[in-house]
Image (cartoon, rainbow, N blue to C red):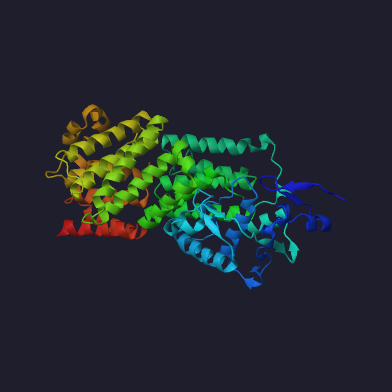
């Protein structure tokens, strides 16, 4: 008789799948005899029940995961794990509330937060949805499958994890080389800013698509999908980014992959970015706040995750403050946003991440200008300060080897130019750039800002570059504003209106108001 065992994380034995082993190896049997063995009885076979009553799958999934975690060194379950089970991130709070109602009816006490020694009766319910969750001392539920005590493999299968005794044998390293080569090519293209090309070659997306045929394991495909989602995010295409994340979630559930802390955090950041792109600001901020509880260590010690978190949180705060500048909390949000932009910039600079640093610098500069115009943070030299930050961002782009101007920087400068008391020509802005004047020299063209906008549009239309709808709409608006008398103005306006359905409702409102102001 085969008496070999396979361990759950933390060394809890689970028997092999024969009759003797199944009866000898339930999870509850791994604990010494005590009152913990007399909790509610959970049947994992469909239809799942607790003490004979039908149970909500999502509530039951969390409880089973808590039971599994109780047998490990860390009994806490991060809210990010539940996010993979819930179809919509904005439903998490509702699902958690439902789960705690079910726990109460099942006679199970669950706590939340990092301190597992706290009495759950005295915890702040308003912070409950942020997790992490843990089972309080008491009657530990018993798990069974088809009337038999559940073993580790069956628990893992219910949770969507790989069975402990059937882990996939690692592929020989040499079979992974073509995959890693394409992934390296994608990373190099990302550093050059070559996210996508008109011909499909020599770009990050092209390399990632080529890597598909070499992603021979779910683990490799998961890594490829996560990277592709970030490329789409960088391109400003939140629909494609979200589609990649959804495919990634289905892959993990289907293959039993449990994301490590780093990819789980990156996935949650992507969901927050997609919510922000849709201008679902509360949802984006809730996801980011939840990350503070579930991934606090990564936010401090992982430069890229820390940068992305602070940069995105600052953008969400900026948008919230500008949505209602007269709100009593708007000024505080504006100040907090600038602080987070500063932290993001410091993290990027410390690690030599020039691409990230230039994003934070440009966002900081534009925030100064927007807060000034909204009277949230008036400055006598707001335009000059904003331009110098953006000029520094453009200088960083050039130091990183980018030979073409940043479209966002160009858009920011053009928006400041038309919002200033007197429209600022490119030459005037060069005088504000200080030590970074040379970085803005490429914008000093005979036709002024109209020539800049027209030139960037030509690069997109000729296939030299590809801009997402957010940037393309911005360029069309600036071309219209700075070149109102141009013969092509009518066609640009029609093109802009045709693109608006691809934007969020808030962005559509901004462009329609700007067009109405131009025709008034």
User: x and y percent of residue 421 in the render?
Assistant: 12, 45
User: Which corner quadrant of the image does residue 406 belong to?
Assistant: top left
Q: Specify whether 26 is left or right of 438.
A: right
Q: Can you see residue 463? A: no
Q: Can you see residue 217? A: yes
Residue at 46%, 54% in the rendered image? 130
User: x and y percent of residue 41 in the render?
Assistant: 67, 65
Q: Specify whether 375 is left or right of 464.
A: left
Nearer to us in this view, 45 or 244: 45
Nearer to us in this view, 351 or 10: 10
Nearer to us in this view, 206 or 382: 382
User: Which corner quadrant of the image does residue 462 belong to?
Assistant: top left
Residue most toward the top? 435
Q: Specify whether 155 is left or right of 335.
A: right
Residue at 29%, 42% in the rendered image? 338
Nearer to us in this view, 205 or 47: 47
* Count of labels in the image: 0
Q: Specify whether 365 is left or right of 167.
A: left
Query: Is the C terminus in the top left, top right, bottom left or bottom right quadrant?
Result: bottom left
User: x and y percent of residue 196 in the render?
Assistant: 44, 43
| Above or below, 397 relative to 325 | above
Residue at 25%, 33% in the rendered image? 440
Residue most toward the right? 1
Residue most toward the left? 422
User: x and y percent of residue 208 in the render?
Assistant: 53, 43
């Amino acid at each position: 008789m085969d008496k070999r065992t396979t361990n759950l994380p933390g060394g809890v034995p689970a028997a092999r799948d024969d009759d003797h082993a199944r009866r000898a190896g339930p999870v509850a049997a791994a604990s010494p005899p005590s009152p913990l063995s007399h909790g509610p009885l959970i049947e994992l076979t469909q239809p799942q029940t607790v003490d004979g009553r039908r149970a909500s799958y999502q509530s039951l999934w969390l409880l089973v995961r808590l039971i599994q975690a109780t047998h490990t060194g860390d009994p806490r379950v991060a809210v990010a794990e539940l996010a993979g089970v819930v179809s919509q991130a904005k439903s998490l709070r509702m699902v958690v509330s439902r789960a705690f109602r079910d726990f109460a009816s099942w006679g199970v006490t669950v706590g939340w937060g990092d301190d597992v020694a706290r009495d759950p009766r005295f915890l702040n319910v308003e912070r409950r949805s942020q997790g992490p969750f843990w089972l309080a001392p008491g009657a530990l539920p018993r798990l069974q499958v088809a009337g038999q005590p559940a073993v580790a493999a069956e628990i893992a299968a219910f949770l969507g994890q790989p069975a402990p005794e059937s882990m996939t044998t690692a592929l020989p390293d040499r079979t992974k080389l073509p995959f890693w080569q394409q992934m390296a090519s994608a990373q190099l293209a990302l550093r050059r800013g070559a996210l996508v090309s008109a011909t499909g070659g020599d770009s990050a997306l092209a390399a990632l698509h080529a890597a598909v045929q070499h992603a021979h394991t779910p683990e490799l495909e998961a890594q490829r999908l996560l990277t592709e989602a970030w490329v789409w995010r960088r391109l400003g295409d939140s629909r494609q980014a979200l589609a990649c994340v959804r495919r990634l979630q289905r892959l993990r559930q289907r293959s039993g992959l449990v994301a490590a802390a780093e990819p789980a955090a990156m996935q949650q950041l992507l969901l927050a970015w997609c919510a922000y792109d849709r201008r679902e600001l509360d949802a984006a901020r809730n996801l980011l706040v939840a990350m503070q509880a579930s991934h606090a260590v990564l936010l401090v010690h992982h430069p890229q995750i820390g940068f992305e978190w602070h940069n995105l949180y600052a953008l969400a705060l900026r948008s919230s403050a500008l949505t209602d500048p007269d709100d009593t909390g708007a000024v505080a949000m504006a100040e907090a946003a600038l602080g987070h932009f500063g932290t993001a910039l410091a993290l990027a600079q410390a690690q030599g991440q020039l691409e990230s640093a230039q994003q934070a610098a440009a966002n900081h500069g534009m925030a100064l200008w927007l807060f000034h115009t909204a009277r949230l943070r008036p400055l006598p030299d707001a335009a000059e300060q904003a331009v110098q930050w953006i000029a520094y961002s453009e200088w960083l782009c050039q130091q990183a080897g980018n030979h073409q101007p940043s479209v966002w920087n160009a858009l920011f400068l053009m928006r400041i130019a038309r919002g200033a008391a007197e429209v600022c020509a490119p030459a005037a802005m060069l005088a504000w750039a200080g030590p970074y004047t040379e970085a803005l020299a490429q914008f000093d063209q005979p036709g002024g800002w109209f020539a800049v906008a027209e030139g960037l549009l030509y690069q997109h239309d000729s296939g030299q570059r590809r801009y997402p709808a957010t940037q393309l709409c911005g360029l069309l608006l600036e071309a219209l504003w700075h070149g109102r008398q141009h013969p092509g103005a009518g066609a640009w306006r029609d093109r802009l209106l045709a693109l608006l359905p691809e934007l969020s409702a808030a962005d559509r409102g901004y462009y329609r108001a700007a067009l109405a102001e131009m025709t008034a």
